[in-house]
Amino acid sequence: MSQRNTGVTVQEVNAHACPVREVLDRVAGKWSVQILVAAAHGPIRFTELERGIEGISRRMLTLTLRNLERDGLVTRTVHPTVPPKVEYELTPVARELHETLQRLTDWAERNRHYVADARAAYDTEHAPELVAE
């Protein structure tokens, strides 16, 4: 739709879209989703997250947790023990997000065969085009 037809300026669209895109980028990130899922069942320690999320580095886990805490999606609790015990827990807003992620996961599970079949059909139909590019 052109700008003339809507009466909405590009600046107004960007002012709304940028914050939404920023939030979606953060919560839809590969590591964020896995952390949110792993922490959904209650407080979880850093080492448990590190062991439970395959392929994540310690640094990436630290950065992602810090960002999720900054965004108000996880709380970090340091228990005064030696060595310090640190736990992460979802906030109520993140629990709501987890419900949405769970529905998305359920949808993906129900439809994964459909998507695989559609990809195979597309690849078969477009194989000559894909080779030529």
Image: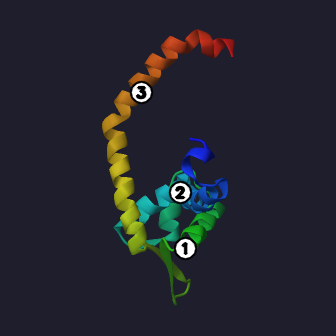
Secondary structure under tag 1 reads: helix
Quadrant hosting residue 8: bottom right
- Residue 116, numbered circle: 3
Q: Nearer the viewer, residue 91 or 42?
A: 91
Residue labelled with disc 2: 24
- Residue 80, numbered circle: none
Secondary structure under tag 3 reads: helix
Q: Residue at x 45, y 20 (%)?
A: 120
Secondary structure under tag 2 reads: helix
Residue labelled with disc 1: 69
Relative to 115, residue 20 above or below:
below
Q: Mark 3 to mark 1: distance in Å?
A: 36 Å
Q: Amino acid at mark 2?
A: Leu
Answer whether residue 52 is visible to the viewer in this image.
no
Q: Nearer the viewer, residue 111 or 46?
A: 111
Q: Earlier in the sequence, mark 3 or mark 2?
A: 2
Could you say where residue 31 lies in the image, as x and y percent from the top left?
A: 54, 56
